[in-house]
Image (spheres, helix red, strand yellow):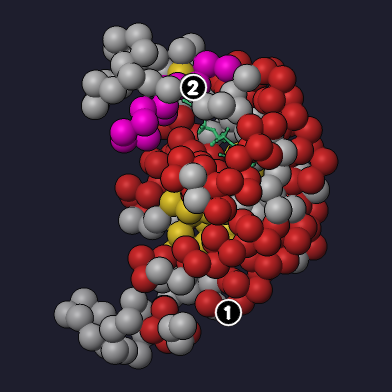
Amino acid sequence: MESKGQVANGGLPAGAGSDQIPNAKPQKPLALILFGPPGSGKGTQSKLLLKTLDFPQISTGDMLREHVRRGNAVGTKVEAKMKAGILVKDEVVNRLVEERLAQPNAARGFILDGYPRTRAQAETLCGMLAGRGAEAVVIHLVVDYNEVIARLTGRRQCPVCGTLYNLKFKPSKVPGVCDLEGAALIVRDDDREEVIRERLDAYQNQTKPLIEYFREKGKRLYDVDASSEPPEAVFQKILALIQ
Ligand code: AP5
């Protein structure tokens, strides 16, 4: 594991690099937590933010889906729960995040998309952040229930480049085909209406209470209206809050 000093300046010796101020206070790594219900735009905003911040997106949903696609031990363990819209076990996601945060490109900062989702995950994350001397900023994407249903039932994704589309809000130029890759767009297994309701229940009962937890812990937490404006406008609001 890297020491705090190495993490803070990307592994360079203090003062290395022509534009560094010798003995300048090292910047803390930033843990940007995108928080909100299914369909609030966590994935969409992560993809916009990672280009500007040059931070990796750490999406527990994407990591779990990749394990399912590979059919390995983790994938086999979580597949049925994901299809049913139920949260997978804390120890499984905590281990995935811990391993991902140990990779060098997460040393300056990272975007957490879909994690933490339970109190046990939030407590584990706080421990991981303290160990890295990282500062957490929580962006709570606020979207109303009916909007979320419309977004998720209309979501389509490119299996090659991951670009997200929406039948209503962001259609591809040719229906069902990715503008960039020409690949046939896919519908996620858990974007059926009855599963969406299950996922929203899990959010309401297990995840939403974390807002209070973040407040108790004194984390920087911002509510951002993500219901009424297009993704680019929401992105600008987030940037203004974190810069
Ligand atoms: P995960 O993959 O994390 O899904 P989710 O949280 O349900 O969130 P989504 O990916 O559905 O939505 P999003 O907020 O990213 O919205 P998006 O940008 O795609 O989790 C899936 C499953 O994995 C869970 O159910 C659970 O089983 C398991 N899991 C994952 N993490 C876990 C954890 N930590 N613990 C336990 N289990 C875990 O946008 C949605 C649509 O809206 C798109 O079509 C998009 O184009 C459109 N859109 C976005 N923004 C706007 C806008 N401003 N205006 C109009 N349309 C918009």
Residue 236 percent location from the top left of the image? 44, 39
Q: Is residue 98 above or below residue 198?
A: below
Mark 1 / mark 2, whichever is N-terminal: 1
Q: Which residue is mark 1?
A: 131
In-front residue for pair 236/111:
111
User: Given the image, on which type of amino acid does mark 1 rest?
Assistant: Gly
SS state under label 1: helix
Would you say the beta carbon of the disc 1 residue lies within 8 angstroms of ligand 1?
Answer: no
Q: Is residue 70 visible?
A: yes
Q: Is residue 218 visible?
A: no
**Disc 1 to disc 2, C-alpha distance:** 39 Å
Residue 57 percent location from the top left of the image? 44, 51
Q: Is residue 66 above or below residue 103?
A: above
| Residue furthest left as drawn | 18
Picture residue at 60% right of the left edge, 40% below the top: 79
The quarter of the rendering in which ligand 1 is drawn is: top right
Answer whether residue 97 is magenta in the image: no
At label 1, counting other C-alpha atoms closer than 10 Å, the crowd grade (few under 14, some 14-19, many 20 or more) is: few
User: Given the image, on which type of amino acid does mark 2 rest?
Assistant: Val
